[in-house]
Image (spheres, rainbow, N blue to C red):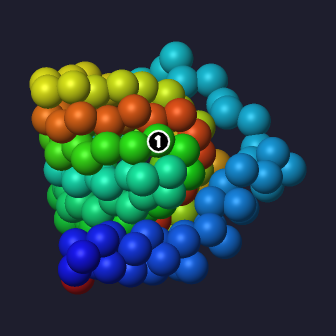
């Protein structure tokens, strides 16, 4: 009974905090069309993340951005709407249209689909309101089914 209460409490917390962000992410008027990513990236990144989904889910992680010869540690928190399961992933990312480090932190939105059982690979693309685009590739472990909207907030670590 206690585990059910904890799971319900976690789900309630995620719903009350995440749904405003997720509904914004799903608003097509709020998202500008994705730009062409065929050129070289402006920066690269490495990250580790964990994600739990039960129709609505949450994610957290950390990484390092490599931009103009410097390394910038960052944290990731996010929300997804659609899917179920738990995964842990390590990945890399190409970052496009980043001209100033001040434009990297912020909320990034994306839509994706995927499935994982045991070892898995994934790829997602997210765009911020500042039009910075992050294209990720990851390898992970877990069991999950994802079909929905994701919103990820990135903060530079201090």
For the C terminus, which image quadrant? bottom left
Q: Residue at x 81, y 45 (%)?
A: 28
In this rendered view, identify the residue nearer to me: 145 or 67.
145
Whether residue 141 appears in this view of the structure is yes
* Residue 76 quadrant: bottom left
* Residue 7 quadrant: bottom left
Question: Residue 51, image x and y in percent?
Answer: 30, 52
| Residue that lies at the very extreme toward the top in this rendered image | 38
Q: Residue at x 45, y 79 (%)?
A: 13
Question: Residue 110, image x and y in percent?
Answer: 57, 42
Left or right of 23: which side holds 59? left
Q: Residue at x 54, y 63 (%)?
A: 107
Left or right of 28: which side holds 54? left
Q: Residue at x 42, y 26 (%)?
A: 114
In this rendered view, identify the residue nearer to me: 84 or 62.
84
Is label 1 in a helix, a strand or a loop? strand
In this rendered view, identify the residue nearer to me: 74 or 153.
153
Q: Which residue is mark 1?
A: 83
Left or right of 101: which side holds 158? left
């Amino acid at each position: 009974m206690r585990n059910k209460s904890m799971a319900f409490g976690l789900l309630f917390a995620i719903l009350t905090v995440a749904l405003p962000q997720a509904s914004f992410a799903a608003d097509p008027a709020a998202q500008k069309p994705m730009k062409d990513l065929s050129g070289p990236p402006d920066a690269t990144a490495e990250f580790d993340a964990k994600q739990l989904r039960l129709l609505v889910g949450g994610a957290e992680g950390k990484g390092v951005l490599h931009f103009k010869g410097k390394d910038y540690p960052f944290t990731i928190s996010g929300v997804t709407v659609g899917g179920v399961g738990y995964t842990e992933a390590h990945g890399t990312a190409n970052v496009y249209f980043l001209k100033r480090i001040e434009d990297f932190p912020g909320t990034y939105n994306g839509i994706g689909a995927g499935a994982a059982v045991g070892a898995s690979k994934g790829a997602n693309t997210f765009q911020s309101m500042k039009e910075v685009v992050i294209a990720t590739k990851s390898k992970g472990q877990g069991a999950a089914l994802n079909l929905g909207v994701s919103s990820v907030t990135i903060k530079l670590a201090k």
